[in-house]
Image: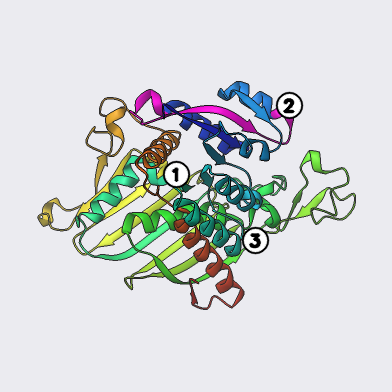
Amino acid sequence: MSSMRVAMIGYGFMGAAHSQGWRVAPRFFELPADPELALVVGRNAEAVSAAAARWGWQETATDWRAALERDDIDVIDIVTPGDSHAEIAIAALEAGKHVLCEKPLANTVAEAEAMADAAARAAERGVYAMVGFTYRRVPAATFARDLVAAGRIGTVNQVRASYRQDWLVDPSVPLAWRLRKELAGSGALGDIGAHAIDLAQFITGLRLESVSGTIDTIVAERPLPAEARAGDGATLGGAAGSGTGQVTVDDLAVFTGRFDSGVLGSFEATRFATGRKNALRVEVSGSEGAIAFDLEDLNALQVYDRTAPAELQGFTKVLVTEPQHPYLGAWWPAGHMLGYEHGFTHQAVDFLRSIAAGTQPTPSFADGLQVQRVLDAVERSSGNGSSWTAVA
């Protein structure tokens, strides 16, 4: 195929990021088929038309089912809130469309299991699904995985992973959809903790088997968004006329996890880390060295070589911008930095190449289900006094 026609369902923050990825990928990478921004879907006709004009989509629709009914659509890209992931993804796969779905895969384990089952059946027909854990595609994070896999830090002894933001510290921040369990599934745990879990497992090649954790809600009630103040008070958990609603998800999650190798890991996901804007950090300590990745310094990887002479030991900042590093050969000369948006381009590249090769793109829906099970185990552990809880 000379092109793969994409329909994107949703058009918010992630819609902008995914649009950038699809649009830029064929300009810098050799692809087996170029993505074509065919259709963007959203319930608000005026808003989705504005998004299409800004990001370069050819057509718009207000019902996602319209995309599935069209024979000229090859890929369904889902960037909606989690409550609609399962319905859209399963229907798209059954309609023979390849699917890219934002993380976390679903709002519940049951939904994620249904999605993974549908993806497995579709794969037998050559139709593939992938979940969007985009931070895997940051070159420094991929390079960290490569170093661990090559044995450069020896046997993994301990893992530390955290994702810290501060955008909810102000109690006057409105009750957005991410703060409503029926739409988001969970709070900091699922929204950003899922990234920390996936990246820790991706870099180490290990899988979490049990957890002991606690989740907490720091600000329990917030102002309703302006468009929800009239008549939505009861729906959003606020008293009539109060102009506030209940936060029904966690603000903070802290847990310990044991991997399948027996190694312990510590994890934190919070949107109350004052001063931290987007601090996703994974540090892996091994018998022969260590690596540390921080998204707020995303073009660098900290590497420690324990086998070096004592007088030369210490963490070394490796600038991951050389053409030999993952993905970098298609971009700029060494030392010319990449940004947040480049991960979405790399995601599009890997997805399209896997489809063309007839191989399962990763992370698969099965991988997304495994992360969903970890999220569920943390919540169950918190509800049971932080007791150790098996990951399904």
Question: Mark 3 sits on what residue?
Answer: 217
Name the mark nearer the viewer: 1 or 3.
Answer: 1
- Asked if disc 1 and disc 3 are in contact, CB closer than 8 Å, the reply is no
Decide whether residue 84 is among the magenta residues.
no
Q: Is residue 261 above or below residue 81?
A: below
Q: How far, Cα to Cα, is label 1 from label 2?
A: 29 Å
Residue denoted by label 1 = 134
* SS at badge 2: helix
**What amino acid is at disc 1?**
Thr
Query: SS at mark 1?
Result: helix
Query: Reading the chain from its start, which is encountered first: label 3 or label 2?
Result: 2
Q: Amino acid at mark 3?
A: Thr
Magenta stretch encompasses residue 37: yes
Whether residue 224 is visible = yes
At a point 61% along the width and 53% down the height, the residue shown is 86
Question: Which mark is on residue 46?
Answer: 2
Q: Residue at x 55, y 73 (%)?
A: 381
The quarter holding residue 333 reads top left
Q: Coloured how?
A: rainbow
Q: Residues within 10 Å of mark 2 (few under 14, many from 20)?
A: few
Mark 1 vs mark 3: which is more N-terminal?
1
State whether residue 132 appears in this view.
no
**Image quarter in which the N terminus is found:** top left
SS at circle 3? loop
- In three-dimensional space, the C-alpha distance between marks 3 and 2, rounded to whole angstroms, equals 36 Å
Image location of residue 145, percent across then percent down = 30, 51
Where is residue 351? Give x, y as percent.
Answer: 41, 40
Say few, some or many: other residues with alpha carbon within 10 Å of mark 1 (under 14 / 14 to 19 / 20 or more).
Answer: many
What range is drawn magenta here? Answer: 25-47
